Image: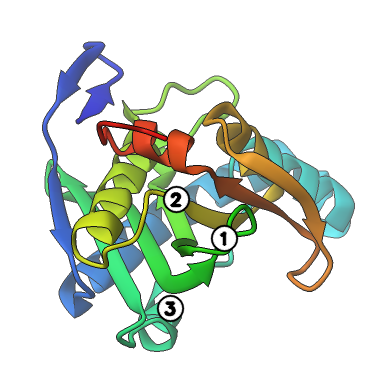
């Protein structure tokens, strides 16, 4: 379930699991077009960022565009082996969010097998930014829920997952209750988070959380 911001009500969505060429191309087209229009608007409103990279980064982060350079077509070719799984969230004939997981990954907490979220993203129209109300919320949490249940039911893992966060998403993962293991210098100085069995059980709506 995700939440429609205009009505404030929970609404059903469709989850498609498994790498799909057609859905990835739809995602690339829908998100790319919206992102291009948004960046052009930011350039018009802030022409000084054309020659000020530090300011450009700041404004992009403030507008939840830390992943503006991601190319989902390339990811389709780089993340397509048996150790990967894709999840697409659809609503109103649009790709509202996507998640790619990698497995197995050793837990820093107890060294057991968990999965690693390689990429998790909500569509640009669902993200917070100044003077804008997202169309849907809860997209990321719903995708995480689906990934946790897949790992438990199909891979036989205990509830748990980890990831490296972009700077503008760190607050989201902290709010979920994930453990912050600090900056990882081996991974572009991104912050490493892990969800304990208890936290992942709650996020996955799994009973008997440890």
Q: CA distance from mark 3 to mark 2?
A: 24 Å
1 and 2 marks in contact (CB < 8 Å): yes
Q: Residue at x 23, y 57 (%)?
A: 150
Is residue 178 shown left or right of residue 92?
A: right
Where residue 51 sits in the image (x, y, percent)? 87, 58
Is residue 52 shown left or right of residue 74?
A: right
* Chain-order first, disc 3 or disc 2: 3
In this orientation, does residue 162 appear? yes
Q: Nearer the viewer, residue 111 or 50?
A: 111
- Determine which of the numbered discs, if any, sits on residue 107 in the image: 1
Q: Crowding at label 1, few (<14), some or many (≥20) Cα neighbours within 10 Å?
A: some
- Can you identify the residue that label 2 sits on? 160
Q: Secondary structure at mark 1?
A: loop
- Can you identify the residue that label 3 sits on? 75
Task: State which mark lies toward you, 3 or 1.
Answer: 1
Q: Secondary structure at mark 2?
A: loop
Where residue 92 sits in the image (x, y, percent)? 12, 41
């Amino acid at each position: 379930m995700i939440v429609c911001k205009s009505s404030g009500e929970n609404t059903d969505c469709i989850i498609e699991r498994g790498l799909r060429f057609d859905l990835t191309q739809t995602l690339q087209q829908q998100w790319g077009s919206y992102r291009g229009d948004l960046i052009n608007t930011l350039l018009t409103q802030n022409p000084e960022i054309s020659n000020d990279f530090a300011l450009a980064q700041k404004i992009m982060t403030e507008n939840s565009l830390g992943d503006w350079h991601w190319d989902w077509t390339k990811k389709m070719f780089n993340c397509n082996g048996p150790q990967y799984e894709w999840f697409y969230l659809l609503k109103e004939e649009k790709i509202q969010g996507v998640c790619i997981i990698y497995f197995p990954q050793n837990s820093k907490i107890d060294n057991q097998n968990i999965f690693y979220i390689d990429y998790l993203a909500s569509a640009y129209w669902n993200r917070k930014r100044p003077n804008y109300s997202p169309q849907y919320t809860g997209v990321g949490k719903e995708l995480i829920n689906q990934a946790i249940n897949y790992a438990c039911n199909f891979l036989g893992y205990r509830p748990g997952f980890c990831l490296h966060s972009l700077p503008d998403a760190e607050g989201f993962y902290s709010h979920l209750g994930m453990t912050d293991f600090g900056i990882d210098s081996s991974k572009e100085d991104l912050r490493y988070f892990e969800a304990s069995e208890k936290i992942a059980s709650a996020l996955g709506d799994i009973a008997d959380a440890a």
